[in-house]
Image: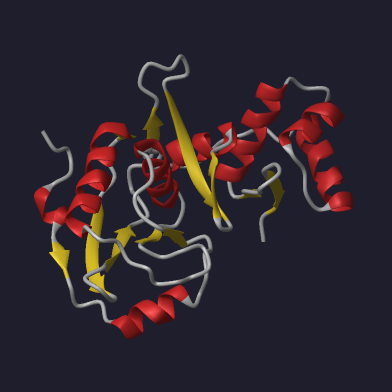
Amino acid sequence: MSRLPEHQRRVVSDFSMRDLAQLVALGENTHLEFKHRVPNAERIAKEVIALANTHGGRLLLGVSDRGELIGVRDAEEEQFALWRALDMLCDPPVAITTELTPVEDGRFVIIVTVAQSTQKPHYLIHPGADNGRTAYVRVNDMSMEASPEAVKLMVAENGTGGGVAFEFGEKEKLLMRYLDSYGHITVDQFANIADLTKQIASETLVLLTRARVLEFHQDERQDYFTMAV
């Protein structure tokens, strides 16, 4: 049985060619991903999960990496493959809407809109795998595995609220001095300079981010923290 509510599966066709051309002209970015068609189930679910876990956005099916509007031949079959992948592999389910824009020769571009979720983190389920599931986020034009810190902050974002209490001790003072000199710090760097385990360094940085002392930045190479503005 489908896990996506029926009203989120409606198909409309009022997205004009002009609208589509303007959207494609932006190129792939944090909010926009192009695919020739629905790839394998894990790949398409990963892209949708990454958008939902970050700032939301659109996935265009039937657009080449270079922005060519090639369309898909059987839009109904492609949508079925998309919905089936999300039904099977997203935990919790991710809400999407789809729109069809005709291009040429009976082909359509499928515009998949993914809202920024209020149920973060969403995970990709790995059936039969030991690690079970993985959270993904959008970094620039790529969907990447979320760091432990990113996952902790998503969980905290959906918490019950309230203040965040912490003690400003020696390791926090050392952190402030380092940031004053270098501007940013990673979990590994903080663990090294403060002689902490990686787990404690991570927990400290996440706590200070939740307290709005620090700001968290997702990066292609390694996530890092800066002083909050």
Name above or below for residue 104 compared with residue 182.
below
Near-viewer residue (26 or 210): 26
Q: Nearer the viewer, residue 168 or 110?
A: 110
| Residue 161, visible in the rendered structure | no
Closer to the camera in the image, 168 or 16: 16
Residue depicted at x 63% and y 41%: 208
> Residue 128's x, y, as percent?
37, 16
Report the side of 151 relative to 213 (left or right): left
Q: Quadrant of the C terminus?
A: bottom right
- Which residue sits furthest front? 105
Q: Position of residue 83 (x, y in %)?
A: 23, 45
x and y, in percent, of residue 169 in the image: 75, 31
What residue appears at the point 36 percent right and 63 percent down from the top-left corner? 62
In the rendered view, tell whether residue 40 sits above or below residue 51: above
Q: Which residue is located at x 62 percent, y 34 percent?
A: 166
Residue 85 spot, x, y in % from top left:
28, 39
Query: In the displayed structure, does residue 73 sit left or right of residue 45?
Result: left
